[in-house]
Image: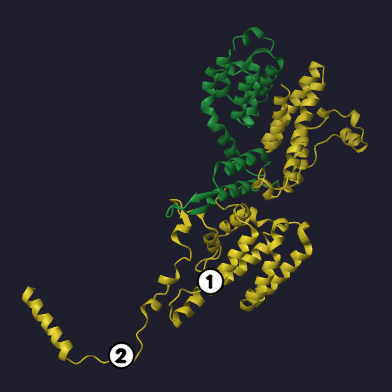
Chain colours: A green, B yellow
Amino acid sequence: MLTLRGTALHDVEQLRYITLHSCGVGLVDYFPPAADLDGMFFFLCLSSSHLCLSTFFCRACLRSRSCSLMACANSLTMHGIITSTAHAYVRPYLPLSHFWVGAQLYDVVAVLTLYLGLYLTDVTFCREGNTSHRTSPLAADKKLINFSKYHKMARIVQGTVCVPF
Amino acid sequence: MGRGDNHDEGNLLEEKILHGVLPSIPTTDVPDQSLLDPDSWLQSHDYLPEDIAFDKDGHLVGATLQAIVEKMTPHASIVDSAFSSIFFLTFRLFSSPTQLVQTIIDRYNLVPPPGLSEERVYVWQQRKGIPVRLRVSNLIKSWLELYWRPASDNVVLKLLLDFNRDALAHMFPGPSQRIHETITTREREGEQAIPPTPRPDLVRDPSMAFIVNSPSEIPRPIMTKTLFSQLRSRNFAAISITDFDALELARQFTIMESNLFCAIQPEEILESGQEGSKPPLNVRAVTGLSTVITGWVAECILNETDIKKRTTLVKFFIKLADVSHSHSSLRGKVCVDSAWYSAA
């Protein structure tokens, strides 16, 4: 995929070789770093030119660099761009993407402007995915407050202020 | 030693008990063995074993409200500050202020185990009764001064006032006076009072990594004189977005969002989506700004019909996203990235 970066935009014939299959492998393997303006510009122009199916994939992959590959895959599926073959290449990255962004947020050196949406998602998942009560290990008929759920939620909220403006 | 020897010794002891001289009763009191080691019965918890659950690392994962309140008012150790902040941040999600006050009062009215001697009751009072009541007093004081949320907590002010007057005032007159003044202040302020700041419930867990690289000095704005004069004269029609420095624009976006972000209350995040919760106005304000920026970026690009100028605009916004990312303004970057996506 790196060889694509040197490709002129008008070289449509060369771009025609980019099948969805090969593009799926290449772009997912090579996330262009944000600082790589040439790479980003290439991909953006590629997408806005609407040259081939890979345009949507380019845009979605660029977005996934900062958002979530899950959203990317969903979007591709919605647009009918992604196929089961390409999805097979994307799938291994799906569970990693959210953790990757989360790790970036938690490990980044302050001062940081947060992407609040991730925290709201985390809180929602934590609240909806955990029961409010749990059975006592010593008495099956006794319900205890699931304090670990609230502990996790509190830590997420505390995380939003760990990197103040 | 054979069996015959044992038999002889047994007879000898029996003979001694029946006909021998018994030793005199000691004149001094024999010390109660349990009083010599009071910890053995003082360290026990007041909750039942089935009222609490820990994970394999020893962290509390489940408990009754009574057990949690006991954790907040231990008699033999200091209160864990991290646990305390988590409790105050979340207790309204699994309980209510009224329930909490009632549980606190029950904890305060802790009585010694039945059947204790007078000495043991005294030791119990000194080593458990008084420390627990002192921590109950501290718990109420912290709640009122640091973690109070007027909208939901003001309903228990009357209860706390009565409890303070009837119980705490006799035991701890000094702290009780301060609690009384705080309750009076809270009553006077009503529900519109602003929650206390800084918010200690948002104090970070020490285990979370946190490195701050504060700038040595506030950066000066990057702006040409022409642009500055046009902004001062509000001549916006003459200004192109590419006249701005990308770094300066990223800074301005960050400043715009800063005030909105800092206004977010923790309960807005914790309780968002829950039934009966208040609408998260400050969260909506932040997300609204992002939507506006995203729409603005997309509109700027799509409104430009000239292909060269559009290319320049795209380059500018790519640079803006890059600068935002390199300055850890992830939200700014997401806004611009979302514009690419929405413009597809």
> Residue beneath label 2, please?
B26
Residue drawn where x is 58% and y is 42% of the image: A128
Instruction: Kindly identify the amino acid type of the residue bearing the numbered disc 1.
Output: Leu
Residue B340 locus on image (x, y percent): 71, 25
Toward the front, the furthest residue is A141
Picture disc at residue A162: none
Residue A46 lies, in percent from the top left, at 68, 17
Looking at the rendered structure, the secondary structure element under dot 2 is loop
Cα distance in 3D space between marks 2 and 1: 38 Å
Q: Chain of mark 1?
A: B
Q: Nearer the viewer, mark 2 or mark 1?
A: 1
Q: Secondary structure at mark 1?
A: loop
Mark sitting earlier along the chain (2/1): 2
> Which quadrant holds residue B165?
bottom right
Quarter location, residue B201: bottom right
Instruction: Let me know if residue A32 appears in the view.
Output: no
Q: Residues within 10 Å of mark 1 (few under 14, many from 20)?
A: few
Which percent across, then down, holds residue B115? 43, 77
Left or right of A25, for residue B48:
left
Residue that carries the numbered disc 1 in the rendered image: B110
Q: Of residues A23 and B77, which is closer to you in this image?
A: B77
- Asked whether residue B183 appears in the rendered view, the answer is yes
- Vertical position of residue A137 compared to residue A64: above or below: below
- Tell me: B257 left or right of A39: right
Amino acid found under the numbered disc labelled 2: Pro
Give neighbour class at mark 2: few <14, some 14-19, many 20+ (Cα, 10 Å): few
Q: Which quadrant, please, contains the N terminus of chain A?
A: top right
Question: Are the numbered discs 2 and 1 placed on the same chain, yes or no?
Answer: yes
Task: Kindly identify the residue that appears in the image at 61 percent across and 25 percent down.
Answer: A74
